[in-house]
Amino acid sequence: MNRRKFLSYVGCGCGGFFLNSCSTAPITERRQLKIIPESKLNAQAAQIYEKVKEKEKLIKDSRLTEIKEIGKKMENSIGEYFYQAKLNDPTTNFDWEYILIDNKKVRNAWCMPGGKIAVYSGMLEVTKNTNGLAAVMGHEIAHAVAKHSVERASRGAILNTGTQLIDIFTGGKLSQVNRATGMNAIGLLSQLGIMNPFNRKQESEADYLGMIFSSLSGYDIRETVKIWENMKKFNKGKAPPEFMSTHPSADNRIKKINEWTNKIILDYPPLKLS
């Protein structure tokens, strides 16, 4: 079989596979490509989460209670929203869990696939109050609801396969470039030109969805912009240029959050839960 015919078969096969793997993100309806099974990532995330709980020093006082209360409100509001909208609930198979990690040096929080959430105590210095904490948790929960990890894993698999195929059909030219430069030049270009912009798009989507989930849960999303103003102060201008980062700049986030706030308050008021 000649090279051109082989490539045409690969292209047609992949095209059909990708079409069958396309879906849309909840609420935003952004087209998504997901070829990695969500159940696989959820199982892996659960295992890693257990290891984190064993390794880290955990806080179990009133601060954790507040985190759990916010989380439970969001769980219920998200489920109710999709029920009322007659849409499939993306959180149906979630096994929600919350931990507070005792580390004041880390100003971060995350939510693994399947609803496994962690907040670092350093983040509480940024959030300041319940509405601020809800804004951060809404953002992290939005990543899981929108299946961003599944997307990233799928896109990474496609890029790796595509790079290998190109290397084969160019007679190893990509490998030659890597050897000549002493680095994974193609990987770096893919990261800066494809993965980083894609990750920034996901972060912006999580900002938007997180504000919706916070509003539906009865929290004041006007506090959201203050989070990024506080983060700017803590970072003291040390953030990398946006094109090198997986996250939008604080200034861009603040701008978009201000643009979204009033409309989200009007369109997604607090839900009355039975």
Image: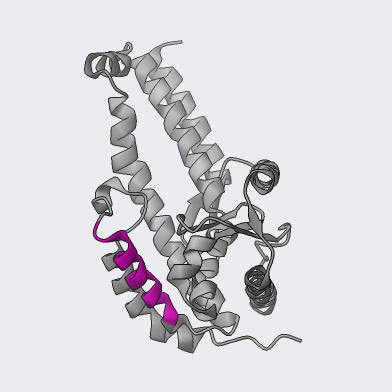
Q: Quadrant of residue 229 in the image?
A: bottom left
Location of residue 90 in the rendering, given as x and y in whole percent from the top left corner: 65, 61
Residue at the far right: name it. Answer: 274
At 46% across and 69% down in the image, what residue appears? 125
Magenta-drawn stretch, dominant element (helix, strand or loop): helix
Please give the name of the residue rendered at 42% of the width and 28% of the height, measured from the top-left corner. 162
Q: Is residue 262 above or below residue 199?
A: below
Residue 77 in sight in this render: yes
Direction from residue 98 to residue 213 in the image, left or right: left
Classify residue 192 by image quadrant. top left
Span shown in magenta: 223-237
Question: What x and y, as percent, mark residue 33?
Answer: 51, 47
Q: Is residue 200 left or right of residue 237?
A: right
Magenta-drawn stretch contains 228: yes
- Horizontal side of residue 51 vs 241, given as left or right: right
- Pinpoint residue 247: horizontal percent, then vertical percent: 36, 55
In this orientation, does residue 208 appear?
Answer: no
Residue at horizontal 72 percent and vertical 62 percent from the top: 92
- Quadrant in the rendering for residue 160: top left
Q: Residue at x 38, y 57 (%)?
A: 201
Position of residue 235 relative to residue 260, above or below, is above
Name the residue nearer the viewer: 134 or 62.
62
